[in-house]
Image: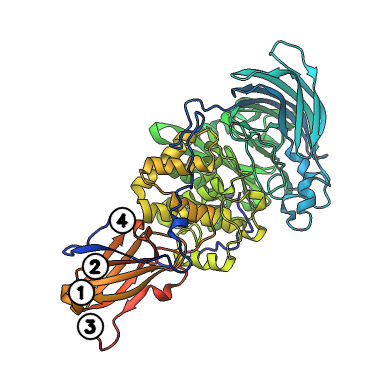
């Protein structure tokens, strides 16, 4: 989602764009001879090399489920949840009611005696845990004055598709429902069917789902709308953390077949393919959709002028049922309105595949300066991210104008209708970027917010640079501007490490901790530590290994170590597990035998707890200018590191991190300059 607490991330470029850097390898400027010395000093000040290079960090063997390399192990398993859902929207009562039929396959080695389902709508019930904890502090996830929640009419279970349904004992606690199975569900592929008949009042739109009014009628953005299986995994068993609002979702994969019945005048857009287009569209609209599927420019399916025109619908009374189907997904969402303008264009994917970019929005915000650009934003984001990281797997990618912020679901996102131009680009590329994290790579958002928001904010940097030559770059000010990142690290005081449960991060710090800091860390790792080639290979391997699966943070860290071929434990620890900061300094220059022509001994100091490779620029009185790249290993023995530089003349200046590529907290000690009138210091 788009975090509106994210006040730290402004727009506007600060600092120069960073050129791509060398990685670990020591590089020598042409004609420069350089010798490293092993001069060390005991750890001083805040820095302790045993903390930074922590032997016990990420230690412990892998398992048959999760390998030590970070890949899924040979006996990795995951349960499957397939859904058949039939619902009817009553727009005047603002209720949704229907039937949710789940086929649940237990691939685990364990016998399950109970099932757990997620009842997210119960967040909106007065007195829910999320309602109580958010009412005053953070009401953006609930709707003050609105009392919602599921009305569960029946819960039934059957063992095979031909057996009879039996009422099942169940127990609802807040946003969870436990079903007591009449017969235990065997591991290794046992199947059980669950049927829930339910309804709920649709909340006024706040942050994720609900309705809002436009001049041509209400827009319903429908999500967290059917009882969904909780995840049973090899890490903790049943994942039953309640839905408090902020911490997002953790879901199993499967196929979802859903039918939505709405009044005849309503258009519906949703996750997955529309299975019965000829039942719900006019022949003109079918023709335009086919044209859009072949077109790089945006094609109107229903124009602003046609909104409210009965001729834009295949019938003029009663209801229509829209049938969608999405395969290999962890969730589905949809939106409906009589007010929708609808347009679309082709998305070109690797290997000659295509998908359809679509946008649905009220006429008030049509036009090229506003939502008329949305479909191109969707198309370009999906094309760039598919080429750079992993091909987009689903048939459609829909952007819906909703009432607040931005929120992502597989194949469909809800972005603020008020967004236009740069702000619409930025929210669209972000929400669509979630297709990769967490929709393709199915991490647990409720626990690890950085694995979706942070990873996504990182890839948004590059999708934004790629769009129209960087027209809307930078994506946000901090992720690729290290001086600004340092300023934010100082200003926030970093109350929590990145590895903090999503619901537990200090509220004012969520934007920085879940989005900006992890994105900046990955940016540093790509641009300054590994270099793009090695980073991209490892990051793509992570996506490939864990596509449609459930990685933990360790699986990510270990995969990056494994594929990059580098022990990066120091990096993961200092950036993701600690609230440390960085301060590199130049503390001295001496000449061998006091003679500049014999060489200079340059001393660096790691004044703070984060370690990073160091880049040093040396300027000589002769005019020679050289850059020395030093690997992170210089800090393994202590906070002080000296090296010999083959000077030919006295040094004018020595600068560590001359390109401002690191979030250095004190730049005052980064520069050494020759004392005036003193050639031999
Ligand atoms: Zn997000």
Within-10-Å neighbours for mark 3: few <14, some 14–19, many 20+:
some
As displayed, is residue 523 above or below residue 451? below
Reading the chain from its start, which is encountered first: label 1 or label 3?
Answer: 1
Q: What label does residue 22 carry, if any?
A: 4
Q: Does residue 214 appear anywhere in the picture?
A: no
Label 1 or label 3, whichever lies nearer to me, is: 1
Q: Nearer the viewer, residue 424 or 544?
A: 544
Residue annotated with mark 1: 592
How far is disc 4 from disc 3 in space, using C-alphas?
A: 32 Å
Q: Are marks 4 and 3 in contact (CB under 8 Å)?
A: no
As displayed, is residue 600 above or below residue 573? below
Reading the chain from its start, which is encountered first: label 4 or label 3?
Answer: 4
Q: Are marks 1 and 3 in contact (CB under 8 Å)?
A: no
Q: Residue at x 60, y 18 (%)?
A: 189
Within-10-Å neighbours for mark 1: few <14, some 14–19, many 20+:
some
Within-10-Å neighbours for mark 4: few <14, some 14–19, many 20+:
some
How far is disc 1 from disc 3 in space, using C-alphas?
A: 11 Å
Q: Position of residue 456 (x, y in %)?
A: 52, 48
Reading the chain from its start, which is encountered first: label 2 or label 4?
Answer: 4
Split into 4 quadrants, where in the image is the C terminus? bottom left
- Relative side of 217 to 606, left or right: right
How far is disc 2 from disc 4 in space, using C-alphas?
A: 20 Å
Q: Nearer the viewer, residue 591 or 242?
A: 591
How far is disc 3 from disc 2 in space, using C-alphas?
A: 16 Å
- Relative side of 568 to 303, left or right: left
Q: Toward which corner of the image does residue 618 lie, by quadrant?
A: bottom left
Residue annotated with mark 2: 644
Residue annotated with mark 3: 680
């Amino acid at each position: 989602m788009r975090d509106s607490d994210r006040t730290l991330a402004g727009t506007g470029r600060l600092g120069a764009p960073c050129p791509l850097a060398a990685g670990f390898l020591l590089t020598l400027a042409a004609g420069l001879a350089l010798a490293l010395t092993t001069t060390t000093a005991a750890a001083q000040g805040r820095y302790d090399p045993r903390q930074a290079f922590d032997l016990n960090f990420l230690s412990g063997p892998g398992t048959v489920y999760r390998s030590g390399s970070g890949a899924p192990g040979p006996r990795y398993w995951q349960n499957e949840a397939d859904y058949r859902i039939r619902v009817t929207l009553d727009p005047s009562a603002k209720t949704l009611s229907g039937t949710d039929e789940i086929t649940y396959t237990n691939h685990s080695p364990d016998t399950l005696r109970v099932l757990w389902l997620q009842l997210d709508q119960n967040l909106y019930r007065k007195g829910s845990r999320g309602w109580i904890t958010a009412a005053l502090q953070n009401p953006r996830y609930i709707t003050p004055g609105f009392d919602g929640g599921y009305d569960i009419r029946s819960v039934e279970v059957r063992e095979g598709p031909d057996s009879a349904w039996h009422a099942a004992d169940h127990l609802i606690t807040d946003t969870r429902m436990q079903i007591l199975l009449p017969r235990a569900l065997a591991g290794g592929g046992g199947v059980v069917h669950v049927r829930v008949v339910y309804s709920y009042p649709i909340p006024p739109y706040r942050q994720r789902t609900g309705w809002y009014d436009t001049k041509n009628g209400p827009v319903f953005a429908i999500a967290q709308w059917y009882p969904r299986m909780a995840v049973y995994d090899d890490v903790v068993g049943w994942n039953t953390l309640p839905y408090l609002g902020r911490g997002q979702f953790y879901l199993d994969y499967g196929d979802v077949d859903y039918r939505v019945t709405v009044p005849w005048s309503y258009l519906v857009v949703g996750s997955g393919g529309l299975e019965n287009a000829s039942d719900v569209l006019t022949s003109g609209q079918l023709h335009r959709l086919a044209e859009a599927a072949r077109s790089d420019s945006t094609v109107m399916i229903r124009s602003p002028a046609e909104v409210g025109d009965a001729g834009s619908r295949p019938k003029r009374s009663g209801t229509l049922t829209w049938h969608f189907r999405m395969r290999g997904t962890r969730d589905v969402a949809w939106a409906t309105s009589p007010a929708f303008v609808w347009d679309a264009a082709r998305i070109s994917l690797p290997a000659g595949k295509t998908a359809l970019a679509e946008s649905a929005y009220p006429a008030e915000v049509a036009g090229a300066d506003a939502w008329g650009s949305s479909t191109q934003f969707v198309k370009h984001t999906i094309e760039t991210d598919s080429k750079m990281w992993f091909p987009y797997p689903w048939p459609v990618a829909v952007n819906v104008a909703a009432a607040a912020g931005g929120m992502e679901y597989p194949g469909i996102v809800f972005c603020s209708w008020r967004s236009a131009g740069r702000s619409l680009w930025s929210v669209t590329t972000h929400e669509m970027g979630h297709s990769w994290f967490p929709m393709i790579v199915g991490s647990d958002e409720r626990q690890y917010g950085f694995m979706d928001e942070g990873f996504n904010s990182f890839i948004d940097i590059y999708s934004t640079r790629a769009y129209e030559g960087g027209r809307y770059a930078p994506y946000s000010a901090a992720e690729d501007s290290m001086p600004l990142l340092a300023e934010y690290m100082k200003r926030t005081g970093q109350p929590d490490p990145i590895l903090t449960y999503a619901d537990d991060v200090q509220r004012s710090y969520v934007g920085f901790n879940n989005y900006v800091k992890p994105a900046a860390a990955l940016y540093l790792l790509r641009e300054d530590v590994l270099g793009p080639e090695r980073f991209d290979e490892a990051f793509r391997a992570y996506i490939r290994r864990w596509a449609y699966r459930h990685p933990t943070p360790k699986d990510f860290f270990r995969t990056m170590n494994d594929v990059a071929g580098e022990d990066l434990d120091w990096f993961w620890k200092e950036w993701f597990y600690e609230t440390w900061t960085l301060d590199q300094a130049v503390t001295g220059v001496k000449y061998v035998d006091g003679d500049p022509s014999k060489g200079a001994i340059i001393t660096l100091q790691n004044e703070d707890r984060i370690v990073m490779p160091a880049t040093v620029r040396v300027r000589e009185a002769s005019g020679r200018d050289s850059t020395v790249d030093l690997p992170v290993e210089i800090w393994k023995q202590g906070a002080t590191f000296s090296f010999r530089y083959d000077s030919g003349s006295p040094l004018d200046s020595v600068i560590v991190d001359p390109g401002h590529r690191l979030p250095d907290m004190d730049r005052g000690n980064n520069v050494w300059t020759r004392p005036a009138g003193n050639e031999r210091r």
